[in-house]
Image: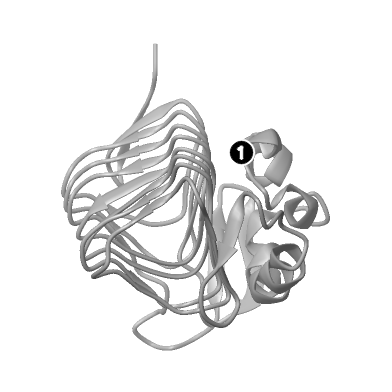
Amino acid sequence: MKELEVKSMYTLTETLAAPLLSEVTYPWEALPKISSFILELGATLSEEEYEKRGENIWVARSAKVAPTASITGPAIIGKNAEVRHCAFIRGNALVGEGAVVGNSTELKNVILFNKVQVPHYNYVGDSILGYKAHMGAGSITSNVKSDKLLVKVHAPEGDIETGMKKFGAMIGDEVEVGCGSVLNPGTVIGKNSNIYPLSSVRGVVPADSIYKKQSEVAKKR
């Protein structure tokens, strides 16, 4: 299942979370460690480049944060990132350099690589978004199953037990998620793939694919 491994999905030079992600095989294994990692990393950040705001919140001095945004620590907002009007960052969030967190977007226990865009009415929880990944307006990660059972990754080779109740989506580099889509718990999307608008996605979408519906996933030409 090498296509699901961190090294297959992500460019680790494009995130401050590289030390954390390089310690695990599959990206979701990093989810329980995000909080402690941010606390350790935050304490090492340059005071010339980052300002500490409130308890365990580090904001790059070059970042733009709207006065109406709500940020709860531990959180790091990277250089040149933009956190827009009424964004709601609930803690355990590492927002990458040049990333955009849009109006009324909610984040919780996430890693956003550099230049990720979640710009309009998105919910992203217990998830990792790779370099330049983009979620269209209203698209969300669903992070808890309706039956409240532990999340499994439905891989082509068989189910992978994660042991986690909360697990949203692992989204590879440069993935485009169409407007109004729902990424169900345990979704994994390989790098450079596109998800059609209004999709309900579950399981694994291979890299370099176009997801039209559950039974129709085409390889990019």
Residue 13 versus residue 95 in the image, above or below = above
Q: Residue visible at 62% across and 49% down? A: 49
Residue 174 visible (yes or no): yes
Residue 23 pos. (x, y %): 83, 55
For the C terminus, the image quarter is top left
Q: Residue visible at 22% across and 38% down? A: 196
Residue 189 pos. (x, y %): 47, 44
Residue 89, by quadrant, is: bottom left
Instruction: In the displayed orientation, state which residue is furthest to the front.
Output: 48
Report the side of 51 relative to 25 (left or right): left
- Please name whichever residue, 1 or 107, is drawn nearer the observer in this view of the structure: 107
Residue 120 versus residue 165 in the image, above or below = above
- Please name whichever residue, 60 or 2, is drawn nearer the observer in this view of the structure: 60
Q: Callout 1: few (<14), some (14-19), or many (20+) C-alpha neighbours within 10 Å?
A: many
Inspect the image, locate mark 1, and give the three-letter code of the amino acid beneath it: Met
Report the side of 56 relative to 83 (left or right): right
Residue tagged 1: 9
- Please name whichever residue, 20 or 59, is drawn nearer the observer in this view of the structure: 59
For the N terminus, the image quarter is top right
Q: Residue visible at 45% across and 66% down? A: 168
Residue 99, by quadrant, is: top left
Q: Residue visible at 43% across and 42% down? A: 116
